[in-house]
Amino acid sequence: MRRTAATSRLIGLLLLAVGHPSAGFAQEALQPYQLVRSLQLVQDRIATGDHAALPMQAKLLEMADARLRTADAEDFKDPKNFRALLVYGMSGGNPVTVEAAASRATTDPQNLALAKGVIDYLTGRPGEAIEALKPIDPMALPPDLGAFLALVKGSLLAGDQPAAALGLLDEARLLSPGTLVEEAALRRSVGIAVAQGDAARFALASTQYVERYLYSPYASQFADSFVSGVIALHMSISQDKLADITSMMDSEREKVIYLRIARRAAIDGLNDLSAFASARAEQGRDGNTNQDDPRALLYASLSTVTSGTIEDVRGKLGKIDRSRLSDGDRALLDAAQAIAGEVVAPPTALPEEKPAPVTVGQPPVLETATPQGADVSGLPPVEGAISEQPAAAAASGGPAASAPDTHAVPSAPADAAAVMPASAPSPAASPQPTDPTDAAMTRTRRQLDVIDQMLGAAPK
């Protein structure tokens, strides 16, 4: 009830400030701490799924920025206003405004060190930020400021000190439960747990996030980290635990998550996980199945494309509605159909070997090395092939790279021998199987390697 009343007062103040004909009215009527507190309340509503509050957040950031630009030393004599300046910065504020306003404030050395650390963090100087913030204990500060500081320090230490980072993120959640700070702390904890290989922490943080913040506008970043974590930790997370977590989602989100897991697992060769996720995606809820979803059919087929039921798989692939697939998945379907056709194609008979004529007195012919750059795979190059990257990597949830993976071929040394003894294996290619069936399976495996390179983007 208290949060509801505060939010109502916030809306009233905001409407009054925005609707007044004087542009400077909001700055005169409201103190910096009042504007920043209003901003926090709006952000907490956004974290729990109120997407309609996003425009209000933008407006409040604009109003807080204007007010802090005009704040003077007299304003910052009130400690609440200086704390508000720092919280504004860590809430996505303008670092130029924070630096200019802090330079006008007269405060104690710890607050100045805190301001410096926040400015370093906002302007992309993580090393300096860590040094400035290291001696400051978030738990010793007022909760509104301490929660943000714990979140910032946890984010800064995530790469080099993941265990310490997780402890700081726990402090952020303890100081500010049910807020955007807790949402961000949980989201980042998921990614750090994956990097640590900590399946128990990953499952706990994922469960807590789904319970509380599934409808946050930032939940797509959690989904990226969750799918990558399920793939990376598949040996440590049971299918029952995975089902427990996804059962808390609505049916559409659960289906999309399982489709993404099935796709990644199929490309990575995790057949059991791919089959499980595909079946869950098709299963649906309340009697409403998703068996007509072409993505579920495609990903389920990938895990069995070289199995003994290949004719059934070919039939399923042939029934998939290509028009309902993305461009990437259409190319993946083409590759799967080509492999299925290769598996069932009759092996090509090998020509009869004829002994080479032997000329008396002629020296034995030496096997020459394969010319540099020759295509020994029998496969065309894959245009624009990319590998799928994990969303948790970055705690900020940036997009995965879309450029093709390129592998440079080292040049042969200038003094390398031009010929090799006939008894030595060729350095450019592994020995080719002589049995027709083995040769067909070798070609199939090579084409599966092409699938492994293809189409890293998650299904839309």
Image (cartoon, rainbow, N blue to C red):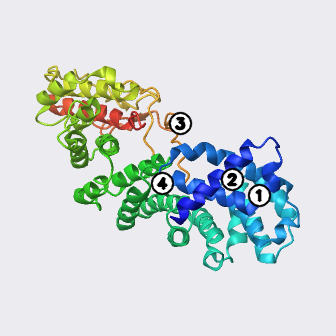
Q: Is residue 72 left or right of residue 17?
A: right
First-in-chain label (2 vs 1): 2
Q: Nearer the viewer, residue 417 or 219?
A: 219
Q: Could you tell me which secondary element the residue under label 3 belongs to?
A: loop
Tell me which residue sits at (30%, 21%) in the image.
Answer: 322
One can see residue 121 in this view: no
First-in-chain label (2 vs 4): 2
The residue to which callout 1 is attached is 30
Q: Which is more foreground, mark 2 or mark 4?
A: 2
Q: CA distance from mark 2 to mark 1?
A: 9 Å
In the displayed structure, 108 sits above or below 70; it is below
Residue 395, how many percent across, how many down?
Answer: 53, 55
Q: Could you tell me which secondary element the residue under label 4 belongs to?
A: loop
The quadrant holding residue 379 is: top left
The quadrant holding residue 279 is: top left
Residue type pointed to by label 1: Leu
The residue to which callout 3 is attached is 411
First-in-chain label (3 vs 1): 1
Residue 274, how many percent across, how many down?
Answer: 25, 44
The quarter of the image holding the C terminus is top left
Q: Which is more foreground, mark 4 or mark 3?
A: 4
The residue to which callout 4 is attached is 48
First-in-chain label (4 vs 3): 4
- Specify the label residue 13 is tagged with: 2
Tell me which residue sits at (17%, 34%) in the image.
Answer: 438
